[in-house]
Amino acid sequence: MTAVATAPSVDLAGVSVGYDDRPVLEHVELSLAAGSLTAVVGPNGGGKSTLLKLIAGLLRPWTGSISVLGGRPGEHGRSVAYVPQAEAVDWGFPISAGDVVMMGRYPRLGPLRRPGPADHAAVADALDEVGMGELAHRQIGALSGGQRRRVFLARALASEPDLYLLDEPVTGVDAATQEDLMRVLDAEARSGKTVIATTHDLASAAEHFQSIVAVNRTIVAQGDASLVLDTDVLRRTYGGHLLFVGDRALLIDDAHHHDEAAGGEVHHHDDRTGAPGRRP
Amino acid sequence: MTYLLEPLGYGFFLRALAASAMVGLVCAVIGTYMVLRGLAFMGDALSHAAFPGVVAAYLLGAPFYLGATIAAVGTSLAIGWITRRGRLRGDTTIGVLFAGMFAFGILLFSTIPNYVGDLFGFLFGEVLGISGSDLVALTILGLVVLAIIAVFWKELLYSTFDPLAAGASGLPVAALEYLFLGLIAMTIVISLQAVGIILVVAMLVTPAATAQLLTDRFSRLLLLAAAIGVVAPAIGLYVSYWTNTASAALIVLVETAAFLGALVLGPRTGLLRVRRRMSSAQSPGSG
C-alpha cells in the first residue's frame, strides 16, 4: 500500500478484457479514490464504455484483478449506479419519468417489498434535484434529450449509491442541462461519492472534472484537467485524429469510428506493450 | 337472455369458460413482458417446440403436461444458452430450434398408425373438451406462474427496461432471463389444450399489443391486457357455441378484433382521432 490514507474506491491491476477473442483493453492499471470526480476520455472504440462495464461487473476481465468498493465488481451492486448511453435505452417503453426513477429503488427493496412512502419521497427528491419534479408523469419518450439524461441521473441519485458510473451522461445535451447535471455530480463527489463518467467532449472534461483518465486500448494517461492540453497525451490517445495548428492540437470529429475498435486504430498506439502511462 | 344462460347449463361449457379465462389471464400477463422484451416470436417457437413432448408423452402413456413441459423448458433454455454462447442473434437460434423440434414432433406423430384425435386437439385447441382434472391442473399451474410474477414483477421490469443498469445494481439479470423463459414455457404448456400449438402466440401477444395502443403506462398496460385476456375468451366461446364453430379460432379472432378496434379508436394510432384533428385543423369553425 502507498501512503494514501483511504483505500481506493475503484482499483484495477493488470486488467485485460475484450469481446470474443478480440482484446479491447489491455494492461489496465487504475486507482480512483472515494470522493473523486473522474472523466474517462478517448476515441470511440478505445474502451471507455468497456472500462465502465468492467467496474460495474457487467464484464468479467480476462486477466488481472478489480476491486470495487472493497469487494469484487458486482458484489456491492446496490451501492453502484450505472447510467447507460442514451442509445442503449428503448424510449418507447411504456413508463413515466417517475417510474424510471423508482427503478433505482428496486434493488434495495428486494423481490417481496413494494415501494413505500420513503421510496416515493426519495424519487420526488431526486426528480426535484435534477429539475424534473414537474414532469414526473410524462412518458419518457415524450421528453427531450436533455430531460431524459436528467431523469436517468435522478434514478442514479434515488438509488443512493457510493459509486456512479455514467456512460456519456452529457453527450448531445444543451449547455444548461450539462451545467445542471455536472453541478449535481460535483456535489455528490464532494459528499464522498465516487463519480466516473465517460465523455468525448474534452472541453467539458477539462472544465468540469478534477481528474481525467485518457483511454485508448489501455490507460494512456491519468491526471488533472491540464492533461487534455498535453499534446503528447492527446497524440497517444487519439492518434491520427488530431490536427495540429501551431502548438495547439485540435481533435477531429471521430464520429465515423464505431464501438468495435477498427483495425486501423491499432497502429496509432505505439506503446501498447510498454507500461501504461501514469501521471501523479 | 336465454342465449347467454343456456350454455351455462352444461358442465363442459363452464369448464371451458373457467379454463380459457385462466389461460387468457396468464397469457396476457406473460405476454406483456414478452412484448416489452421483444420476445413475441418466442411464444410461437416454444409452443411448436412442445409438440414432440406431447406426442412422446402420448406414445409412452405419460401425462402430456410432463412431456410438453420438458420439451418447451428444454428448448427455451437451449435457445438462451446457444444465443449467449454461439454469437448468433436470438431470432436465428429460435428459427432453427423451433422448426427442428416441430419436425421431430411430426416424425413421432407419423409413427402412430391410427388416427389420434387427441393430438389434433393439441394442434388446434379443444377447450370445450377439457376435463375436470385438466382444469384443476391448469389452474394450479396458472396460479404458480402468476405468483412468480407477483414476486418478481419489479425485477423483471427493471431488467427488461435497462438490463445494464439492473445488472450493475446487483440484480441477477441472466437468472431472471432464464426464469422468464421458463415462465413462457410453462404458460404455453398451460395453454396447449385450450388454444392449441398454432394459435397460442396470439393469446400471448395480442392482448399486450392491444393494450400498448391504448396506454403508455406499464401498470395500466398490464391490467388492460389481463382484462382483454379474461373477457375475450368468454365472448369467443359464446360465439363458438351459437355458431357451432372452432372455439380456439374464435377466441383468437375476438382478441384480433379488439386489437383492430384499438387501432381505429386508440388515442395515438386512432383513425377517428386523426380525422378529428385533421377536420379541426382544416375548418376550425365548423367542428
Image (cartoon, coloured by chain):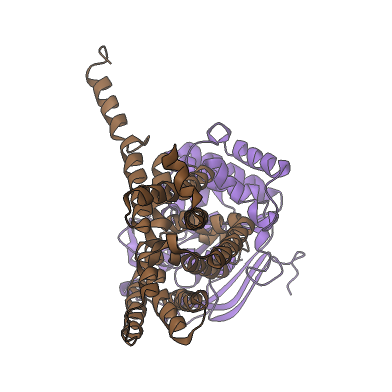
Viewer can see residue A122: yes
Residue B122 image point, x, y percent: 39, 70
Depth order, front residue of A248/A263: A263
Chain that the image shows in brown: B
Residue depicted at x 50% and y 52%: A205
Residue B157 image point, x, y percent: 54, 55
Q: How many marks?
A: 0
**Quadrant the C terminus of chain A occupies:** bottom right
Determine the image quadrant of residue A117. top right
Depth order, front residue of A65/B222: B222
Determine the image quadrant of residue B159. bottom right
Determine the image quadrant of residue B279. top left
B85 relative position to A75: left or right: left
Residue B129 image point, x, y percent: 44, 63
Depth order, front residue of A133/A225: A133
Chain that the image shows in purple: A
Residue A169 image point, x, y percent: 50, 50
Residue depicted at x 29% and y 26%: B277
Query: Relative to residue A123, is residue A260 depicted above or below?
Result: below
Query: Relative to residue A118, is residue B82 depicted above or below?
Result: below
Viewer can see residue A271: no
